[in-house]
Image: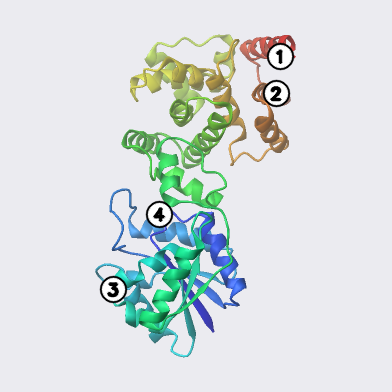
Amino acid sequence: MRIAMLGGSFNPIHNGHLMLSEFIKSEFMLDKVLLTVAADPPHKSSEGMLPAGARLIMTGMAAADKEGIEVSQIEFMREGPSYTADTIKELEMMYPSDELFLIVGADMLLDIPNWKRPQELLQSVTVIGAMRKDERPYDIEAAREHLREKYGAKVVLSGFMGPDISSTDIRRRIFTARPVQGLIPEDVEMHIYENGYYMPDDIRLMQEKLKGMLKIKRYRHTMGTVRTAAFLAALYGADPEKARLAALLHDCAKTDKKSLKKLALETGIPADRWESENPGLLHAKLGAVLAEREFGVKDNEVLSAICAHTTGKPCMTKLDKIIYIADMIEPSRDFSGVGLLRDYAEEDLDKALIASMEFSVRKMKEKGEPLHPMTGIALEHLKKEMNKGG
């Protein structure tokens, strides 16, 4: 067999890694590519580095449906730094009659002489270099010739010219509440959100607290709303960190009807006639109270978005609208018509909000539940504003 190793910290794995693996597998007629997760990367800072087990799980999730792309935990079987020369030596013992390849970024060809035991390494594999779009071919060609002349290395260059995606950029984007859709597989993305990976410490502490307050399904819905709010905030120019915070806490008071009535009494929040008939409506304004009292949120924009995410209200802010819509269309929602709402959300915020509110009105009527008049007032106000602008 022809087997290639693509090693890395995969912190996290992203679509660039997967596209590169599939392209090179086809280009060089490989039987399989081993995504080899570094247990202890010798040349990487530990700052921001997830535990090896967490990175291995995400890499496994990403490769699960990729034919001929496998995840290797060979570097987990030994202690100390994860040196490529040691890994290749072990792979030679595992595949004694097979041809081994090593996939590296073409820029790494310049650095291989500084790796551990480069002579031994380069005599054992054919190196496949993958260039980035901004790299200068003559520098890479010079590095290839140097490896050939000094070490007798077999070095070939891939024609891969895929997207320039960086794990560092993904971590930075998540930390600053910016979207990462399209950069990493969706199931890996949701895994990152649900576990609070790469998030600021205060957000991770809130997540841990929420896990103890919400049922698993509700918590996953919450983190899907956080993901969607990040996308919409970037699309419509809203404050990303406020959007993350409001989305994170929008359902912090979501519980059963009996508990909601009790919480309303304890917090001194009066229920109107419609909320008394349908206590589930209380969770939004109670959520704003809990966000302030239990989570220390003082930002009125954030509290407003939490309070308005169920019934809406007249004169909704951009953030109010984003949280209302994100709650409606986050990835776990699968009701009939949600795809259309998602399309609207990418076209026009107000159009998506009107469609979402109208959907809610229809569902309430179908269930025979009382419709809070605030929704009708908000919907009428929004339509008037759109007509003025239209």
Q: CA distance from mark 2 to mark 1?
A: 9 Å
- Can you say whether 312 is above or below 134 in the image? above
Kindly identify which residue carries mark 2.
351
Q: Earlier in the sequence, mark 3 or mark 2?
A: 3
Q: CA distance from mark 4 to mark 3?
A: 22 Å
Q: Earlier in the sequence, mark 4 or mark 3?
A: 4
Of badges 4 and 3, the one in the foreground is: 3
Kindly identify which residue carries mark 3.
116
Image position, residue 308 (x, y; %): 54, 18
Q: Earlier in the sequence, mark 2 or mark 1?
A: 2
Kindly identify which residue carries mark 1.
386
Of badges 4 and 2, the one in the foreground is: 4
Q: Amino acid at mark 1?
A: Met
Kindly identify which residue carries mark 4.
11
| Residue ID at (37%, 73%) | 74
Does the CB distance between marks 4 and 1 fall below 8 Å? no
Q: Amino acid at mark 2?
A: Lys
Residue 292's quadrant in the figure?
Answer: top left
